[in-house]
């Protein structure tokens, strides 16, 4: 069977895919084979779109809602929007999806033999965001990351045909770390959505209140809390980094880029004095390249 894309993304879908440039890590860099780039962007389009639905970043009467057959009033309900999106996702596996990004995902699913579970996990995470805005313990947060982040790494391994149990375990560590880093960068933005992804037990430990997180700049207690969570994320990235050395060639470069993206973002948070309330600290390209080189060097030594 000839593998062709079934639809050209419309303007709304192009905007969704364009957000890849703002991520902490390279989503589908130029050095990868064209087929991998297409597949990774197809998965990214799904993941980005489901997050945008969950965050309420899409216009209720916009193209995405129309593609899913939703009227503006129904699309105002994020859970209803997610339900419609899940129904269309299921058509990827047993029918003809309506949304252009899901039609674009279908060849990837078929070529790589992907299963629904990772995609459903990402939808479940966004459903959880509509019901739960606080996490009592670090373990509770890790359980959320199991839905919101880890499926992405598992999909990357499946697309590249390298998904072994040990690699999946290491990938989960890296993806969880990347999710925590994003949460640290977006503390103020998330609070505006009435969400706090800093464990309540840690807020108590560092004597941080929700009011402290709403300040325009971070006080000493907030900075200490962010430094603590950043170190946790850094430890997870280092724990997962043997994944990079377990693969070869261009895939090693890609996974090094993912890991380095998290480390570079943590450097940016550190350079900001752990004050994440003034805006998301962003890494620089030179530091990203430096971290990627360090990750690759470590992978060669460990290999």
Image (tube, helix red, strand yellow):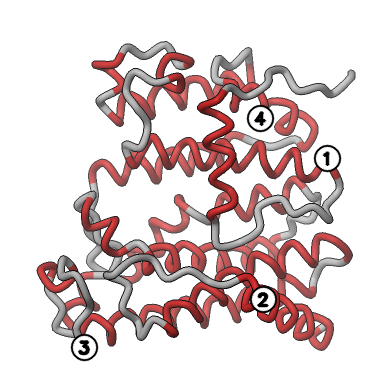
Quarter in which the N terminus is drawn: top right
- 128 up-or-down from 134: above or below: above
- 8 up-or-down from 299: above or below: above
> How many neighbours does mark 2 have within 10 angstroms: few (below 14), some (14-19), or many (20 or more)?
many
Q: Which residue is mark 4?
A: 105
Label 3 – label 4 distance at C-alpha: 46 Å
Of label 4 and label 2, which has the lower sequence position? 4
Q: Is residue 18 left or right of residue 179?
A: right
The residue at the point 79 percent across, 84 percent down is 297
Of label 3 and label 1, which has the lower sequence position? 1
Of label 1 and label 2, which has the lower sequence position? 1
Of label 3 and label 4, which has the lower sequence position? 4
Q: Which residue is mark 2?
A: 241
In this view, the mark in front (1 or 2): 1
Which numbered marker is on residue 35? 1
In this view, the mark in front (3 or 4): 3
């Amino acid at each position: 069977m000839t593998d062709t894309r079934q639809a050209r993304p419309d303007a709304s879908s192009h905007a969704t895919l364009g957000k890849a440039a703002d991520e902490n890590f390279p989503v589908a860099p130029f050095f990868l084979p064209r087929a991998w780039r297409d597949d990774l962007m197809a998965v990214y389009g799904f993941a980005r779109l489901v997050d945008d639905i969950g965050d309420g970043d899409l216009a209720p009467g916009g193209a995405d809602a129309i593609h899913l057959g939703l009227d503006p009033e129904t699309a105002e309900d994020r859970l209803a929007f997610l339900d419609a999106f899940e129904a269309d996702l299921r058509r990827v596996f047993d029918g003809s999806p309506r949304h252009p990004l899901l039609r674009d995902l279908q060849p990837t699913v078929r070529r790589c033999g992907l299963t629904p579970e990772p995609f459903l996990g990402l939808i479940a995470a966004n459903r959880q965001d509509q019901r739960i805005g606080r996490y009592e313990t670090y373990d509770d947060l890790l359980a959320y990351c199991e839905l919101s982040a880890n499926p992405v790494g598992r999909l990357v391994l499946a697309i590249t045909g390298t998904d072994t149990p040990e690699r999946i375990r290491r990938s989960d560590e890296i993806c969880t770390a990347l999710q925590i880093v994003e949460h640290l960068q977006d503390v103020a933005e998330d609070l505006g959505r009435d969400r706090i992804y800093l464990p309540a037990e840690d807020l108590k430990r560092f004597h941080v209140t929700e009011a402290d997180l709403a300040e325009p700049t971070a006080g000493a207690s907030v900075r200490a809390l962010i430094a603590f969570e950043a170190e946790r994320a850094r430890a997870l990235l280092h724990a997962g980094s043997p994944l990079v050395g377990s693969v070869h060639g261009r895939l090693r470069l890609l996974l090094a880029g993912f890991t380095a993206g998290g480390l570079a973002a943590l450097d940016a948070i550190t350079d900001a004095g752990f004050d994440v309330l003034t805006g998301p600290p962003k890494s620089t390209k030179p530091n990203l390249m430096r971290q990627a080189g360090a990750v690759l060097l470590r992978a060669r030594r460990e290999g």
